[in-house]
Each structure stands twice: as C-alpha cells, then as structure tokens.
Image: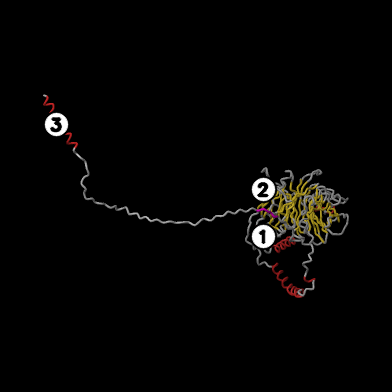
Amino acid sequence: MMTGGGGGGDGRKKDGGALAAAVFGDAPRQPSTDIHSSWKTETSLEDANTQTPAIITSDNAVQSTEMVDSEIQTEDMDEPDDRYQPIADGDDDAAAPIASFLERIEAAVSRQLDLNARSTAFEGFEFASHGLRESKITHTLKNLALSAEMQAVSAAFNRTGSVVAVAYGLADKQEWWTATSHICTWNLDGIRCNPNKPDKAMELESCATCLSYHTSDISLLAAGMLNGEVVVLDTSQDEGQELVCVSPFVADSHSEPVADIAWLRHHGDKSELVTVSGDGSIILWLYNHMGSLSLAKRVCVNVLDIPAYLRPSDAGAQQVELGVTCVAGKSAVQGRQLYLGTETGCVCRVPVTSARAPVVGNATDFAYRPHLGPVHAIAHSPHLDNVFATCGTDGKIHIYHQLQSHPLVTLDPQRAALLSVVFHPSRPAVIMAAAADGALVAYDLLKSTTQPTDVLDGGKDDDNTSPPAIRKLAINARRPGTLAAACDDGSVKVWALGAHLRETVPGEQHRMVQWVADLFSNA
C-alpha cells in the first residue's frame, strides 16, 4: 500500500515540468503587403514669415473759446446820401448821351408796355405752383409771461415784413384800464426767434387797441390807446427807452378809446398820422421826426351828414356824432380821401387836407350803403385806387367803388361776424377776411364771388373747445406770402399762404380793372 501511494505522487511532478518548459515568442516574420489609401494625399508643408507696417495714430482735440454775435440795421431809404447823385444834376459828360438815349427810346418802350398790358395772349394762363401748395401755420407766437386772459387785439408788420408787432389787452373791456399792458415784437428772420418769448416787450401804462408801423421808418410804431392817447415808439431803442412821444392832452383829443390808427404819408421831416374813435372824431396828427406829436386837424361824422336812405333805421335824426370804428386811406387817391366805418353800420368818405385847423365840423362828402350792424374793418385796394372793402357784424364783405353808393358786390361766406379784412398786396383779385369763429376766408374775385376760394382753420385753443376769434389780420407787400392773425387766445398765428393765394397771375391787374368797370357801368 505504501508503494502504491508513492507512485501516484511522481506522476504529478513529471507533468508540471513539461508545462514550465513551454516558452512564448514572436511568430516567424512573414512577407508584408502595403495597401495605399485611395483618398488620403500627402500633405506638403512650407514655412513663411510676414510683417505688417506699424499703424500710425494721432489724437486731436478742439475747443471753441469765443462767440461773436452781429446785428445789422437797414438804413433809412429817405435819408440823403451824398455818395450817390443823379447824373443829370452834375456836370458829367455822360449826362447828355444818356438823356438823349432815354428821350429816343421812351416812346417805343411805353408803347410796347401799353400793348403788353392790353394783350390777352396769355389770359387765363396760370404758372405751375412751386413750393408750398397748401396754406399752413409756420409760427404761433405767444408771450407766455403775460396773463392767460390777455388777448392779441392787434398786429402789424413793419415795412420790410420781417418784424411783427402785437398789442395785448382785453378787446371787450368797458371799464377804465388800471393795469399795465404790453406791445411785443418778434423778428421772424431772427436766428433766435422764440415763439414763446418776444424779442422785445414794451410795457405801457394803458392798453393798446391798435397798431400801425410807419410807411418808411422800419422801427417807428404808432399805437392808439384805450384812454384815448396816441403813443409813438421806436422799437430799435434799448429796453425802457422805446417811448418817443405821447399825444398832447387838449380839448380836441379823443375822449374815448382809439379804435383805429394809420400812417398816411410823410414829407420832409414830418409825417401824417390819422386816428379815429368812438367819440365820432377823426384826428389828423403831425409827427415831427425830432420826436413830437401835434394835433393838426379834427373832423367829426354826424348822423345828419348821412343821407336818410343810407342811414340805419335806428340811427335817429338828431345832430349826433357817429362813433367811428375803422379808417382806411391812400395818399395817392385824388384829394386824399379817408374811408370810414361806424358803430351804426354807416360807411362814408371824408376828404383830408394838410392845412392846420383845430376843429372842423361836418366833413363827410359821400356815403355808402350800410352794414346791418357795426363795421369792424375797412381796407383800401393797393391795386385799384377807386376800390375799398368793409366787413362787419352782419358777416358780409362789401366791395365798393368810391363813386357808387351801393356795393359793386357783396360777399357772404356764411360765417360769424367778420372782424378784419385785407386785400392781397400782390394778387389784385384776392381778398381775405377773419371771422369771430376762428376761420379765415379767402376769395379770388375773378373765379367766384359766391364761394370762398379757401377757408383756413386757425386751430383749436388750449381747452380744445373751439378756435379762438381772429381780431386782426396783417399782411405786408414785401412778403405777400405771409399773413399774421391776432387771436383772442393771446396768440398770433403766422400763415404761409399757398401758391393759389400768393403767386401772381399774368394779366390779373388788367382783368380786375375790366371787372370793376363792368360792374360799375352795369349798376
């Protein structure tokens, strides 16, 4: 049994030695085959260097250190200038040839100009409109420093049309004025024109009711006052120094508020100024350019001066003075007549002379068919010497010929009371009126006398209820496309008129002359 057990142990030892003798190694090297890629390519590399030039930079700073303001003032055209003398007054050798040439050519030129004026070759022709086609408001001027209840009661342009003056007050105030009021000016050409702050505000002891700029002096402004006085201001002076003179208080002065004022003409160193009032007086003042104002003449309008058939039914038959509300005149008219509107609706003509006379009685020499109610405004045509227009509470515009008592035509825009009327300075056929309902109506008389050519809406006031009434219209011949409207809300709206109202039409003057002649002859 011992032997058998030992034999089994030897067998296991022999097998373990065989396993230990086994060694792993690399297989014999066999021939290899390379398979090249069909989609990869060899990459070639190349080295290169670059260098950008240096970037040059610089910084600069500027600062303005000085400001320069300059103002200019046009010279008075009426002042003599020794630098320029008419050649005919000198001994220049050129005077004789020039005079000879003018004498030789004058007849032919005058003949051709007359033919052009009578020609109908381009009658009805109208230029294509350029620029502004529709009228629009370009400025709304208002002095915010004044009380909100203040109204713009009057407005006026100076001779160049660049400056508009505005009088502030209360149009319907009846009791005596105890507070101060202002006249303000805006330069519409000024770089710093602020619509809410005037360039100049002149304080007055009483309320101004009407304004008129001098016909040649661009800074001389006359104002009629609520207390019956007349003041003359120089708007070019420093603040507080504008007052030039005040009308003297004499027995023949106005005893009621000045209703209207107008410069008539100037000769030498004197100018004529006319004022009217509700006391029935028309006063001619002489203004001396040294700074004084004197009463030259006073005339009155009485009820009995008006023919009975041209008086309103309530005018009465007593020798009483008619309150005058407005005046218009033109120095070129023969006899220098004034045209007047009154509180009763009467319209009349008064001749004016320059002779000094303290008081003259009844001076009316012609009367016209009246309005049904007070006449608020009157305007003389700058194109037709014999034509003037009125407007009043009855809402109508009467266009008169000075030699005919009844109107040539009556325009009825179907609006509220009309408070102001103006003729266009460059369009003989265009007339415009302002209404108490805030509308501005314009007529082209050669197109229609029944329907307005245009109705301009002045816009609503601050509480968005209704447009304010327009108290006064102002227009200037130097800028016929600009119209100013003084409103009850204290603002002055400056309109740029559309092409259909401002652009001249060839032959319009001749056609208007014929239009007036036809109506006058058919009356």
Q: CA distance from mark 2 to mark 1?
A: 25 Å
Q: Upstream in the sequence, badge 2 or badge 1? A: 2
Which residue is at the front of the view, 48 or 523?
A: 48
The residue singled out by tag 2 in the image is 459
Tell me the kind of residue under disc 2.
Gly
In what element is the residue under mark 1?
loop
- Quadrant for the N terminus, please: top left
Per the rendered image, the range of residues in magenta is 64-68
Q: Where residue 326 sits: x, y (%)?
A: 78, 52
Q: Nearer the viewer, mark 3 or mark 2?
A: 3
Q: Which mark is residue 397?
A: none
Residue 297 is left or right of residue 141, and the answer is right
Label 3 crowding class (10 Å Cα cut-off): few <14, some 14-19, many 20+? few
What predominant SS class does the magenta segment belong to? Answer: loop
Q: Nearer the viewer, mark 3 or mark 1?
A: 3
Tell me the kind of residue under disc 3.
Gly
Q: CA distance from mark 3 to mark 2?
A: 131 Å
The residue singled out by tag 1 in the image is 503
Q: At x 79% / y 72%, what residue is drawn?
A: 90
Q: Is residue 234 above or below residue 125?
A: above
Q: Residue furthest top?
A: 1
The residue singled out by tag 3 in the image is 11
Q: CA distance from mark 3 to mark 1?
A: 140 Å
